[in-house]
Amino acid sequence: MDSLKVKGMNCQHCVSSVTQALEQIDSVHSVTIDLKSGLVQYETNGDVDLEALKAAIVKIGFTPE
């Protein structure tokens, strides 16, 4: 399972938004988010471009680290 930190999430709606955005990327099939730490963990079915993940997060208004 890979991970990245995301800034700006402060409620369950934020968690849902990030989860949905990442799960729309073809090779991402599982997303788990710890709201308190901002840690986003994800599993993929192959190679995934980290920049594509970050772009999906930025597009919905959050900041990946």
Image (cartoon, helix red, strand yellow):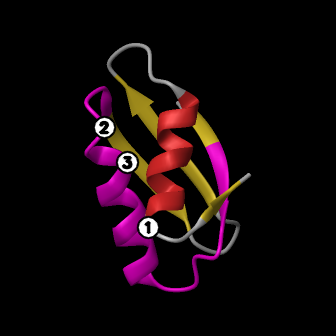
Identify the residue under disc 3.
22
Mark 3 Cα-neighbour bin, 10 Å: few <14, some 14–19, many ≥20: many
Identify the residue under disc 2.
25
Which amino acid type is marked by label 2?
Ile
Identify the residue under disc 1.
60
Report the residue at 61% width, 40% height from top: 3
Cβ atoms under marks 3 and 2 closer than 8 Å: yes
Q: Which residues are magenta?
A: 4-28
Query: Vertical placement of 11 versus 56: above or below?
Result: below
Q: Secondary structure at mark 1?
A: loop
Which amino acid type is marked by label 1?
Ile
Q: Is residue 54 magenta?
A: no
Q: Secondary structure at mark 2?
A: loop
CA–CA distance in space, label 2 to label 1: 14 Å
Please report whichever mark, 3 or 1, sits nearer to the chain's N-terminal start. Answer: 3
Name the image quarter holding residue 62.
Answer: bottom right
Residue 35 position, x and y percent, is 58, 72
